[in-house]
Amino acid sequence: MIDDLSVILSEGESYTIEFKENPDKELPTEVCAFANASGGKVYIGVHDDGYVVGTDTSNDARSRIQDTINKIEPRLNVKFDVDLDESIVILTVPEGIHKPYSCPSGFYLRSGPNSQKLDRDSIIEFFQSEGRVRYDEIICSDLQITERFNESAFKRYVRTAKISDVLDREAILKNLNCAGISGGKLCFTNAGALFFRVNDEDVLFRHTGIVCALYKGTDKANVLDAKELNGDLVSNVDDAIIFLKKHLRVSYKIETLRRENILELPEDALREAVVNAACHRDYFEKGSRVMVEVFDDRVDIVSPGGLCKGITPENFGTVTITRNPIIASMFFRIDYIEQMGTGIGRMRNAAREANVAEPEFEFSGFFKVTFKRNEQDTSISRQFDSSGRQAVVKRSQAATAADRKRNIVAFIEEHRQVKVSDLVNAIGLSNGRVRALLREMVSEGRIEKVGDNRYAYYVLKS
């Protein structure tokens, strides 16, 4: 016996098992469905109810079965076994490596114990899920590069990537896979449109932007600030980082006359997460955009599309599969990503070096990176030793106030003039506490208040 037939018959048909009395015209659909799924076995000579009826197992019969299977495209290597005692032919169908497979009646996919014919939309979705069609490679036949070409973005990219100016624009775009010939005309690929076309009011590309939001609290009930970024892809990433830096707390490491700004979350990790979202999001999903969200307790960076096919929760972070290879290559050329496949490790390393919690990852229909923020506590002061490592120590209220005043002076030195709201965001204290410190510093003659009420700002005392 090739298999433990009694067990198989008792368990019935399944996702990987199909019974057929004879090699009829539906045989190619069953084999095709298995090849497009995870593979399986077809038992010819077995009734649907699981009892053996037998079939012709002669060489001529097997040859006819092979001829039937050969109608599947592309060609598929199916293994034949024969159980002579029971007069059964067993076909072992591997999972195809050149999906999708079709037979004369169309495309089929195994779903549970049945084989389903795919309609047009399902075929498109299947192609996308298998990575046979990549969004960034598609040539947009109706988008000639002469239409709304973003000259400044192109020049900035070429300069940053150190691309020789010996080549003309057309040659550079072709070499970058950002343009191709369609209908005798040079047209953008989707990647080219994302990097070098003015897309801010283009409905075809509105979903490719980034939405940034600042919330009060830990949910989305109260929006304090929001910004939609619909420029070229590089500018979107840069502007998202600017948004984060604007709304995250900053500390200062002061050594004699030198001062260093320390963002509460490592900028390298945040940048890696935003670039990763732009590189690997599912651009076929047009109902969602990349979200960069700042809450009181965390920062979430969310992109449409879960893990790429071939990456599992178990091998996540160790296996490299790129959903949009042209986009990833474009960012690699300008050093926005250091090396293909190292992004997750770089985020974790940057967090460890900054002595903050490592990012957390979630992946279902979306891919989310979460950076935990430190809670503010008025009983402690965060300072930095000479090595730049963060040390948290309990201090007296007077000493804590002195440190905060030094931070305020450093912040005003950098920005020349600041409002109360600027300092609230920068040093993470309440509005009332900031105003109290400023009043003390004015009376001490260290700073000067200019203007009144909500228009007031503070400068260093000259």
Image: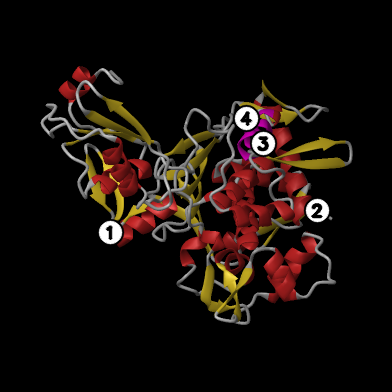
Tell me whether circle 2 and circle 3 mark residues in contact (CB < 8 Å). Answer: no
- The residue sitting at 59% across, 29% down in the picture is 357
Circle 4 crowding by C-alpha within 10 Å: few under 14, some 14–19, many from 20: some
Q: Quadrant of residue 114?
A: top left
Amino acid at dot 3: Arg
SS label for mark 2: loop
- The residue sitting at 32% across, 42% down in the picture is 63
- Viewer-nearest residue: 265 or 307: 307
* Marks 4 and 3, the one that precedes in the sequence: 3
Tell me whether circle 1 and circle 4 mark residues in contact (CB < 8 Å). Answer: no
Q: Which residues are magenta?
A: 343-352
Quarter placement of the C terminus: bottom right
- The residue sitting at 59% across, 67% down in the picture is 231
Q: Nearer the viewer, mark 1 or mark 4?
A: 1
- Viewer-nearest residue: 32 or 409: 32
Q: Nearer the viewer, mark 1 or mark 2?
A: 1
Colour scheme in use: secondary structure
Tell me whether circle 1 and circle 2 mark residues in contact (CB < 8 Å). Answer: no
Amino acid at dot 4: Val
Residue linked to disc 2: 461
Residue linked to disc 4: 356
Circle 2 crowding by C-alpha within 10 Å: few under 14, some 14–19, many from 20: few
* Marks 1 and 4, the one that precedes in the sequence: 1
Amino acid at dot 2: Lys
Q: Residue furthest right?
A: 257
